[in-house]
Image (spheres, rainbow, N blue to C red):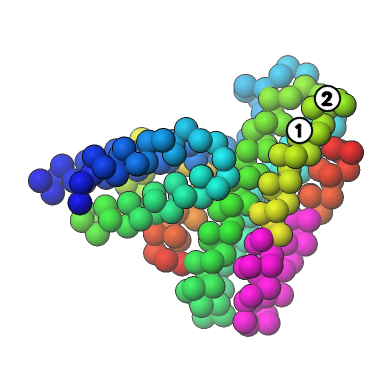
């Protein structure tokens, strides 16, 4: 009975995680043969966001182990970082399938990117700015600033 | 706990590519990992490997943290 429950739980886990798989690579497979520089720049910037999220997760872990943030603060950051990562993954995957931006598809990508910027704003306002320790808040704010550089790049490409 | 009811409730959420839904699924997955770990003593990496799931590093780290409530 116990084994059956573990098997059932594993099955649910598989179903839940299948939709979460995210790989940022060099785009050598699956994408169009020729992409404009603008599309490549947008993909690179989206990948930069994922890389910064990765560094921020590691920093969050260090801050928790140093007792500079609480477990609740860490948990809140994890939830918000997940939103950013998911939104960025969706944007990145769509861009990687694109050959070029044009007047027709730009508004759609701009709308899609709004999900990313909203998640980043929420990470900042509901996560980082609520951190009580000033040093920890400062360190985490630096990651938000780095992410926002990539955001500015993508917004410019979508105008 | 009726696992079939959970599966029935979860299945409609799985194919939805929305950000909010993905967040819900992540919470569910984290809780399931926690449950399986408690019952089997396996690590998160072992559970994912046995399930044949490959996640990007960000997702795996966040799921580990969420499963620990961190």
- When the figure is inspected, residue A13 is found, relative to residue A66, above or below; the finding is above
Q: Name the residue under label 1.
A: A108
Identify the residue at horizontal 73%, vertical 51% (top origin): A117
In the rendered structure, the residue with mark 1 lies on which chain?
A
For the residue pair A131 and A36, the one nearer the viewer reads as A131
Q: What secondary structure is marked by label 1?
A: helix
- The image position of residue B70, as x and y in percent, is 46, 67
The quarter of the picture where residue A16 lies is top left
Q: Count neighbours of disc 1 (C-alpha within 10 A) and say few if under 14, some if 14 to 19, many if 20 or more.
A: few
Residue drawn at the location 81% of the way across and 54% of the way down: A149
In reply to whether residue A130 is colored magenta, the answer given is yes
Q: Inspect this view and state whether residue A29 appears.
A: yes
Determine which of the numbered discs, if any, sits on residue A156 in the image.
Answer: none
Examine the structure image and report whether residue B39 is included in the region drawn in magenta: no
Callout count: 2
* Apparent side of residue A64 relative to residue B9 in the rendered image (left or right): right
Provide residue B31's location: percent of width, then percent of height. 35, 55
Residue A91: x percent and y percent?
A: 68, 38
Magenta stretch, residue numbers? A122-148
Labels 2 and 1 touching (C-beta < 8 A)? yes
Under tag 2, what secondary structure? loop
Q: Which of A137 and A155 is in front in this view?
A: A155
Q: Looking at the rendered structure, which numbered label has been put on residue A104?
A: 2
Q: Principal SS element in the magenta part?
A: helix
Q: Which residue is drawn at 39% across and 64% down?
A: B68
Label 2 lies in what chain?
Answer: A
Per the model, the C-alpha gap separating discs 2 and 1 is 8 Å
B70 in relation to A31, above or below: below
From the viewer's perspective, is A39 left or right of B12?
A: right
Q: Can residue A54 be seen in this view?
A: no
């Amino acid at each position: 009975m116990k084994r059956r429950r573990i098997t059932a739980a594993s099955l649910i886990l598989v179903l839940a995680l299948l939709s979460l798989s995210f790989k940022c690579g060099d785009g050598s497979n699956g994408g169009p043969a020729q992409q404009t520089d603008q599309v490549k720049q947008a993909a690179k910037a989206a990948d930069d966001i994922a890389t910064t999220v990765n560094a921020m997760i590691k920093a969050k872990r260090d801050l928790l182990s140093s007792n500079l943030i609480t477990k609740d603060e860490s948990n809140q950051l994890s939830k918000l970082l997940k939103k950013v990562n998911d939104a960025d993954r969706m944007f990145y995957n769509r861009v990687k399938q694109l050959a070029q931006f044009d007047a027709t598809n730009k508004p759609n990508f701009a709308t899609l990117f709004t999900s990313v910027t909203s998640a980043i704003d929420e990470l900042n306002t509901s996560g980082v700015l609520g951190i009580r320790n000033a040093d920890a808040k400062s360190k985490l704010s630096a990651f938000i600033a780095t992410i926002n550089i990539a955001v500015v790049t993508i917004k410019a490409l979508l105008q | 706990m009726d696992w079939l009811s959970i599966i029935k409730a979860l299945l409609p959420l799985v194919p939805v590519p929305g950000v909010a839904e993905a967040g819900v699924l992540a919470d569910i997955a984290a809780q399931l990992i926690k449950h399986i770990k408690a019952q089997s003593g396996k690590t998160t990496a072992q559970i994912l490997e046995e399930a044949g799931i490959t996640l990007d590093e960000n997702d795996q780290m966040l799921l580990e943290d969420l499963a620990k409530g961190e």
